[in-house]
Amino acid sequence: MITMPKRFGMFVHWGPYAIPAWHEQIRMRKGISRAEYARMASGFAPEKYDPEAWVKLAKDAGMEYICFTTKHHDGFCMWNTKQTDFNIVKTSGRDILKELSEACRKHGVALSLYYSIPDWNHPCAYNSLSTHQCVPEEGDTPDAEAYRDYVRAQVQELLTGYGPIYTWFWDIPPKIDDPSMNEYVRSLQPDILINDRGWSEGDFSTPERSVPDGDTFPRYTEACQSVGQYSWGYREYEDYFTPAFLARSMDKIFLMGGSYLLNVGPDRDGVIPEKSREIVETVGKWYCSVKEAFVSGAEPCTEIASGALWVSKTENTYYLHTKAPLISSGLSLAPFDRLPESAVLLNTGESVECVVETYPEDYTGTYGVNRAPVLRLRNIPEPGDGMPQIIRVTF
């Protein structure tokens, strides 16, 4: 099983699209002109942005890194770029990324950078081969080579001005083969990991809003999901996923060896909404209580897994992961027929009662017993929050 070096991170989608508070792709989805969007973006001056509050939320939830959207599809840059005036320093006087990088470094949280390849503000960026494109406007001159020169210049700024970067997250494959782009990224930061959405294959895969089938990932994999069902950026009237739904998705991704990037969208002032914060805190509390199962080196154990459980194991320890809320207080753990040294519900730290016996359903006929005694877990504590239960059984 190939495992990402860091398991749990925070994704942050933030830009002037937080002002209309509808969706990060509002310009394309509602047909807003470049000039109209620029007028709206000119008022983007977050007054309550506190990067240390973000970092503390992430760290308290057990997150090891933050992946920040330096530039989304709208082309607005969240750092002090010299390549365009369409940036946060021009509208607010603050280098948002610089402040975040310093907060991450202070608190020992790694920093990753997201960079959108589509750019609805750049006159050369339109790419008919790709998706998430705005139709060129009067005066635009689509030019793939000229646009890549622009991207390289911005990559140089981002990878030389903000300290060590853990991962680089290209977004939206351009469907143009050019390995030199990733080579340039590595020339600036040799230890960086690069995802698979750029001009060449990259180091890791990025399934989005889904849990792939299978038991293990064949390569480094970072799954990403947002706390909101419809938007990655701040949406005023969002429908939010339940913490239990997110935790079950995380559980399966971690079991397969992947990492999980959970997204929040700060509002126009830079504040992570209360509901988003509560979800991160709840999921983080669960993760911190059960993370042993994911960092212990346990491998999937398909021969014991059942309809109710995923199972992973180290040499003498098995981790039982509930796929859904248990329908009763007991579980059968065939093929084991002996008592373990211990059984503990990681969620709460409570011991789980164990017996070896034959249940009534194992008897048939007038005299016969068709099955040998097996290990049963009884009176399994119910945490009461609907989160996945993970039981550690050690022999």
Image (cartoon, rainbow, N blue to C red):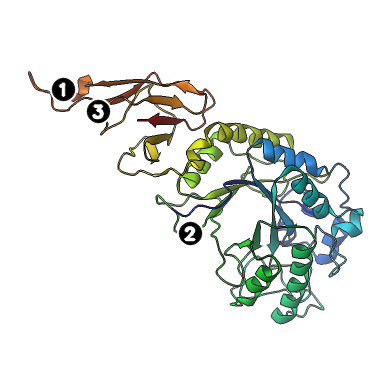
Q: Quadrant of residue 69?
A: bottom right
How many numbered circles does the render carry? Answer: 3
The residue type indicated by label 2 comes to Arg
**In the image, what residue type sits under mark 1?**
Tyr
Tell me the CA gap for discs 3 and 2.
36 Å
Around disc 1, counting alpha carbons within 10 Å, would you say few (fewer than 14), some (14 to 19), or many (20 or more)?
A: some
Camera-side mark, 2 or 1 = 2
Q: Report the quarter where the C terminus lies.
A: top left
**Secondary structure under the numbered disc 2 in the rendered image:** loop
**Above-or-below relation of 395 to 231:** above
Expressed as whole percent of the image width and height from the top left, the position of residue 48 reads: 86, 41
In space, the residues marked 3 and 1 are separated at their CA atoms by 17 Å
- Which sits earlier in the primary sequence, circle 3 or circle 2? 2
Horizontally, is 303 left or right of 96 in the view?
A: left
Q: Secondary structure at mark 1?
A: loop
Residue placed most toward the observer, 6 or 46: 6
Residue designated by label 3: 337
Residue 25 visible: yes
Image location of residue 355, percent across then percent down:
30, 20
